[in-house]
Image: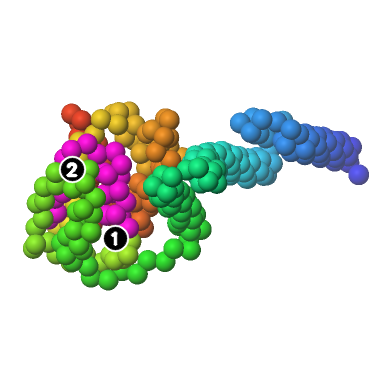
Amino acid sequence: MHPAISIIAALAAVFLLMAYALQRHSIIQVRKQLADADSLPVQHRHIRLPLPGHEMEQLVVAVNGQLEQRRQEQALHEARELAVKAEIANLSHDLRTPLTSMQGYAGLLQNPAVPAAEREEYLDIILHKLAVMNNIVESFYELSSMDSGDYPLSSQPLYLYSLLSEVILAFHTDLDRKNIEVRLQLDETVKVVPLDEKAMIRIFSNVLQNVLRYGKSRLAISLFTEADSVKIVFVNDTDQLRGQEVSRLFERTYTGDPSRSSGQLGLGLAIVKQLVEKQGGSLGAQLADGEFQLVFTFGE
């Protein structure tokens, strides 16, 4: 063999050995980084390529993509865990409040010296607290069903003027008892919209219950058509809400009443928002000059 050819062959062999050694070194370093990835903080889990190489670069890019996806999934999981813990804490607190009250009144009923009139009063209070607890549990279950997808909705052409009028009429006595003046501006010519009737009754009922709980003296309800969409607007005065709270009203773990003295978990508007969005509608809220406004839009 010609000496020059022998030298070239030897150099080629050395080059291949060096390339193999460098590639092996890169693989070892990448493997070590992968092994250490679980012990690193989530934001630092990123693989670095010790030496350049097209194939290795593609591999590292793919691995980093998987690590980033895993980081996002872990962050989402941790956020959900915190939300669940907050919900459980709120639920426990709001169930404990009426339960403690019921235990106290039940103890009074055991006293034979309590007059019959007071016994009836205590029994009425216990029954009211039981209704509060039942509402809390049902609302929490309803939200859980929505999250799991086990809450089917059946759309059918719905005439909102009639349905809204019926729900308002059902709440007339309660609103009158609380001295809330109701003003209606409902357009009978609004078009029918494909919606779930039971869901819409639940939406209107929750909003009116919210008015009864936090409203002051006035409630205005409007139904009209705007730009081919049907809009429903509820406006009530209130002194129990601050402007910075509006953006959080639809969070199930949030309540605008720090003392939670009413024994009511803040789930009503969270249910409203989910039901509206599940039907392709939108919901907006704002507070201005002591008036709280909810705006529903359907059929956009």
The residue shown at (66%, 43%) is 63
The residue at which mark 1 appears reads as 201
The residue shown at (24%, 34%) is 238
| Amino acid type of the residue that numbered disc 1 sits on in the rendered structure | Ile
Q: Is residue 100 left or right of residue 178?
A: right
Give above or below for 145 relative to 9. Answer: below
Q: Which residues are magenta?
A: 202-225
Quadrant for the N terminus in the image: top right
In front here: 55 or 6? 55
In front here: 32 or 258? 258
Q: Label 1, secondary structure: give it.
A: helix
Magenta stretch: includes residue 19: no
The residue shown at (8%, 63%) is 189
Residue 265 x/y as whole percent: 43, 43
Res. 84 image quadrant: top right
The residue at which mark 2 appears reads as 180
Q: Label 2, secondary structure: give it.
A: loop
